[in-house]
Image (cartoon, grey):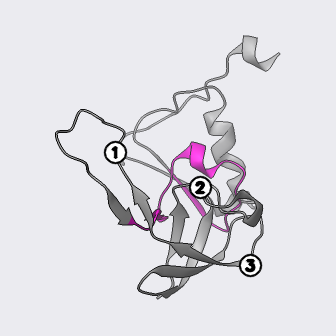
Amino acid sequence: MLVIVTLLRILNPKQGLCNGTRLLITGLHENFISAKIVSECNRGGVVFLPRIELAPSDVNLPFILKRRQFPLIPAYAMTINKSQRQTFDQVGIYFDKPVFSHGQLYVALPRSGNPNNVKFTQRHLNEKYFTRNVVYQEVSE
């Protein structure tokens, strides 16, 4: 099973295991997952991910809720902000509405080294659709 996932917690920054690190699952075991790092930092490194204990931050529950799980999510899609500082062979950008913050389009476009490998799509395929790159002059100067 070869699945690319995104790490959701900071586990070991020196080893490259930070929030947003992309990993290729190489083995599933009862208490850990073995994976290879595919993000830029420590690319190719083999890591072992334990299940970790998670508890909600809402302290108003009438009971104590704790669960043990792997801090991973499938990485078939990610937000523009999560993609920052990462490089991909192929990039698809889905606009269901225009970009909304300073420089967001600028962050999304160069994720692939080849502009021919960047594709755009939108929700309303039969309509002409434009997006505006939001740039605030006071931030740019």
Query: Residue 31: where, in percent of width, then height?
Result: 44, 81
- For disc 1, the neighbor class at 10 Å (few under 14, some 14 to 19, many from 20) is few
What's the residue at 24%, 32% (across, down)?
Answer: 60
Kindly identify which numbered label has been placed on residue 44. Answer: 3
Query: Which residue appears at 59% of the width and 71% of the height?
Result: 23
Residue situated in front as seen by the camera: 116 or 80: 80
- Which amino acid type corresponds to the residue marked 3 in the rendered image? Gly
Query: How packed is label 2: few (under 14 Cα within 10 Å), some, or many (20 or more)?
Result: many
Please indicate whether residue 50 sits to the left or right of residue 45 in the image: left
Query: How busy is the neighbourhood of tag 3: few (under 14 within 10 Å), some, or many (20 plus)?
Result: some
Residue 103: quadrant of the picture: top right
Quarter assignment of residue 29:
bottom left
Residue 124, image x, y percentages = 34, 44
* Left or right relative to 36: residue 51: left
Magenta span:
69-93
- Amino acid type at circle 2 is Gly
Front in this rendered view, residue 15 or 116: 15
Across and down, in percent, residue 2 comes to 51, 84
User: Which secondary structure, mark 1?
Assistant: loop
Q: Residue furthest left?
A: 62
Say which mark, if any, is on residue 42: none
- Measured in 3D between alpha carbons, the distance from the residue under mark 3 to the one under mark 2, in whole angstroms, is 16 Å
Does 74 sit above or below residue 1?
above
> What distance separates the C-alpha of mark 2 from that of mark 1?
20 Å
Total of numbered circles in the picture? 3
Q: Which residue is mark 2?
A: 20
| Residue shown at 21% from the left, 38% from the top | 61
Indicate which label's residue lies in the foreground, 2 or 1.
1
Q: Is residue 79 magenta?
A: yes
What residue did someone put label 1 on?
56
